[in-house]
Amino acid sequence: MLWEVEIHPLGRDGERDRVCDEFDLLTSSKRGIDLVTATSRGYLIDGHLAGVDVQNLCDELLVDRLVERVDVRALGTPLGTPATTVLLKPGVTDNVADSVVTAATDLGYAVAQARTFRRYYGPDAHAADRDLLARKILANGAIEQAVTGPLHASNLAVGQPYAFRLVVVPLRDLDDAGLMQISRDGQLALSLDEMRTVQAHFREHDRDPTDCELESVAQTWSEHCSHKTLKGVIDYAETAEGVTTTRRYGNLLKETIFGATQEIRRRLGPDDWCVSVFSDNAGVVKFSDDFHLAIKVETHNRPSSIEPYGGANTGLGGVIRDLLGTALGGRPVCNTDVFCFARPDYPADQLPAGVLHPRRTMQGVVAGVRDYGNRMGIPTVNGSISFDDRYLANPLVFCGTVGTVPINKVVKEVMPGDLIVAMGGRTGRDGIHGATFSSLELTDQSETLSGGAVQIGNAIEEKKVLDVLMQARDRGLYTAITDCGAGGFSSAVGEMGADLGAHVELDKAPLKYAGLSYTEIWISEAQERMVLSVPPEKWQELHDLCRSENVEAVVLGTFEATGRLKLSYRGHPVGDLSMHFLHDGRPNVVRHATYTRKPAAPVAGDTTMSPHDALLKILGTYTVCSKESVVRQYDHEVQGGSVIKPLVGLLNDGPSDAAVVTPVLGLTLGAAIGNGLCPQFADLDPYAAAACAIDEALRNVVAVGADPARTAILDNFCWGNVTDPELLGALVRTAEACRDAALAYGTPFVSGKDSLNNEYKSPTLRITIPSTLLITALGRVPDVRQCVTMDLKSPGNRLLLVGTTHDELGGSHYHLVTGKTGGRVPCPDLATAPKIFAALHRAIRGGLVRSCHDLSEGGLAVAVAEMAFAGGVGADLTGANDVTSLFSESATRFLLEVTPENAAALLHHFDGLPVTDIGATVAEQRLRVAGAGGEWLIWAKLADLKEAWQKPLR
Amino acid sequence: MATPSVLLLRAPGTNCDAEAAFAFEKAGAAVRSVHINELRQQPRLLKKHQILLLPGGFSYGDDVAAGKILAAQLSTFLADAVREFRSAEKLVLGICNGFQVLVKAGLLVPPDEDGPLVTLAHNPHGRFEDRWVHLAITPNSCPFLKGLTRMYVPIAHGEGNFVCRKEWIFKGLDQAGQVVLRYTDPQGQPAGFPHNPNGSQGDIAGISDATGRVLGLMPHPERHILGTQHPRWTRDGLKPEGEGMAIFRNAVEYFTG
């Protein structure tokens, strides 16, 4: 019997308020409240249940009668009032429904299937409005369907029986056009060169590939999995003052970013503190006597652009799995999340086809990250949000995780004869073609074409996996582990068995529903799955451990020293590939890159805006303004390691430079996490932008107390279409800056990722994202009791500016708010900067710094304003008396608060380095900045500054 | 009596267990972490322990409603063992999700013939929120809170809005001395949002059962055990320990003192 359990809120109808607000915003109207008069939620339940059973189930489990009212009816009963019901499409993960089935069964109810729904009541009028409402607000067509009127269904089961049929793809006799047709039709994203290589390989073996083999090649060779552009050959031509020089990179990453790390490790010699870099699923560095720290940052841009909640949710889930799959398993201790969106008040009527409104994207992304991190119990301690309208169709979602690895659990080695064990979630049709899809450009068709690539995560499933994995690791029940990410089993098993060989019986994988072909099982990107290599004698113990906590684990096959990847389904061979061909057979990509060095354009544009008004305006820009409403949605304190929180100051609402946690509770050794992101400079000078991003990330962690000599960094490149030589040229310059700055600062890159082709194309419009490099910094804090925060502490102290301010207003927020253009962009002085970082760290360790804030967007003016209103302490600046001093965004600068008695000692640490006493803290609740002629350039109440900063995203 | 022993009950989605265990161990207790599956198989495990701890997290994802599924399991499969545990003068502590479980299992305020008397509903603003709160403490007969008057600790939840079915129920709880923890402003006065972060009736942050030996609270005392966990320790100076520590020490001293 099919039942519908509809639950109505008593009292406030929060969902109605939400959708009405959304409609009004999207249409700039006030018609929302007429369209939606009430909302409800509920369950469709299939099982051998009488009406009274369902009522009992409601009381025992489903309904809280203090705040809810329930209607139970047979499915299909007319509702009496017009309504739209929104359901997840069949096959899309429905965590709550799955929990209901499990819990109800456990309690003795014969529930076979369940699905959740949401329902929206409203008059059957305003057809155009209703249509817009259903499409743009109530349901996301990528994962949900909206049904008008009562629901009808004969059953809730998903899937149908699968009859095995081996699919062979004849390609030995095809011409180029035929090869490309196969690549396109199969969404393989293989280039002609690559297809030809595949063809030659199979000609040599006198047979055609199976679909499964072709997919394995496509997944392994995808940009997402092999980073073929950054690791490929690049012919680079650089033009400066009319003279062109060329150089060839055989492997750009290796020669710049990896190269810098290798050089730093060589210089450190026996003091090298890197453990594993660019080889495992995350970078690993030394931390304490007993633990190393692992860190990984990934992007999940494409899925987040289509279904922001699911995309961000699985983005964070995926990077956490990377950490679980690092060494013999890392334990996550904190997350960092950085997003780039178009401004949230983007005119709704100017949205290109197939693009979600940025406000909705932002809400969905934040909620997705929130729900995964909070449920996993991993504090989200650091992040930032940048805004630029060019992120409209391609929002960027960076998710990162830091974790601990016991020092004796680093080495993993698959042994011949080890069992291939899949652990965690079941395999469904989820995310098929995620890896190849994230290497293609988005089009106005993407919303409909790519639905299969979008998924919803199940954080509790992953938490269960984490819980048993840590026990299994400590009991030594497996020899190696990796996560199932892009490419699913094909990538995970393919990577783990690369040096050995593997035989996989695809029919052994537990499925969410029947009907998956062997190829779908092989490439499915269903979430929350790990692959382990397990010695046969340990299997029973692992199996029992998993079972005791309701985690599914099955043997999929065996690692064997054949050098081949053999796949079978119910005894039928469906694939037999040489590991060597799979991993080393890809033809090298050769790309061309050009870059023209341009002298800084002269500053253009006039402004009558006073520094006072400019400061208020900059504080109110979306990028600079307070993100408190977002930060508070993240649990940033779970696990108890929080030392410096993302929000600091008198009222716990000032913007911390970086977060500090103690990864091992009870130790005073800390980890600081910060980030640098300067896309605003990249348009003018990609080299300077990258160096600034590294400088900023380092500034953030050093400002709170991290040791710059023990700080590791990570790169994440998000770029436009790299077949465009100029965009690739900017990327080469960025990589070169990464090398130079990392070497100068002694900060090794330990991990990195790239997401290319972030471009939107429709017949009439092309939007390329700003060239975006995110640098994440992980610094070791020798003693967290010496940490420093950015809020001013008390009146009567001195304010010291560390670093040199140049006329570098190019790309600055001052230019943004005044409409000026041109100018020189900041670029750190790589000779002096490391000395400044070292001196500041010594001063902080000496306990001489009361507060410290790095200078970034908005320069000195914004930094001092933030310090003042965060601390509830006023400031008078007398040593910064023009626009450049106040608003230039020159790198490697800090504003320090120091007590008068400690000022001399502090200055001593900066002997020979640029440092200036520029003012004092005062009790009066205001910020004053004196001009050269004795006038006040800025005279503002702290309350007004704070209001300007808090208002935009409150 | 020597070291009291804590049974830390873990379920899929429990995630504040490590820091809660840290707090109890620091206070001198021994902690054994037990999965709900194991306890269902061996309810007698409870007999070996003096304190039952339900830590925070998202048990079963808080699917259906916060704490509901674990509560249903406790009521259906472990009712006798838990009843026996309580009547043996032992202590039960539910923090955040653990409080939600205790409330929904009827272990703090038993239901009457019309169903549950109290619940924890969604925060009125509809969001999960992490925020530090000031608590006014009326210990009454609750051993966990003995001698305490104030506490500064964080909350982190989306469903902490304490709701009574009727006004008389709230008054009854108050008169019975069960309303032991209330949200206040920094001066200790009743105040609205954000001081009362979730719209709870009567600013209720935590209640005890009629005996005082079962305590449930939304805030996280286990997140304020160390001085460095205070959000303003860099301003106000580093304290030797956090204010939440007292709850765990009290619990241990109830058995040893």
Image: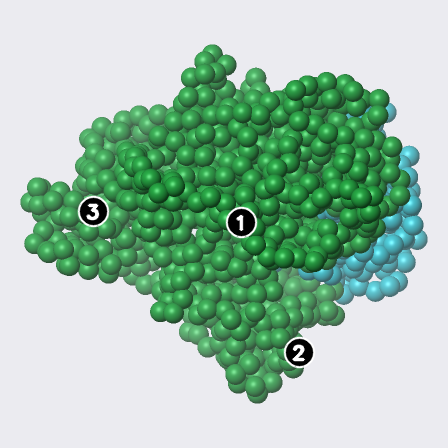
> What label does residue A194 carry, if any?
3
Viewer-proximal residue among A448 and A712 = A712
Residue A45 picture location, percent across and down: 51, 67
Comes first in the chain, label 3 or label 2: 2
> What label does residue A527 carry, if any?
none
Residue A510 picture location, percent across and down: 36, 48
Query: Which of the chains bears the disc numbered 1?
Result: A
Q: Is residue A41 left or right of residue B257?
A: left
Mark 2 to mark 1: distance in Å? 46 Å
The residue that mark 2 highlights is A30
Residue displayed at 45% across by 16% down = A267
Q: Nearer the viewer, mark 2 or mark 1?
A: 1
Residue displayed at 50% across by 20% down = A273
Q: Residues within 10 Å of mark 2 (few under 14, many from 20)?
A: few
Query: Which of the chains bears the disc numbered 2?
Result: A
The amino acid type found where label 3 is placed reads Glu
The residue that mark 1 highlights is A602
Residue B87 picture location, percent across and down: 79, 40
Q: Quadrant of the C terminus of chain A?
A: bottom right
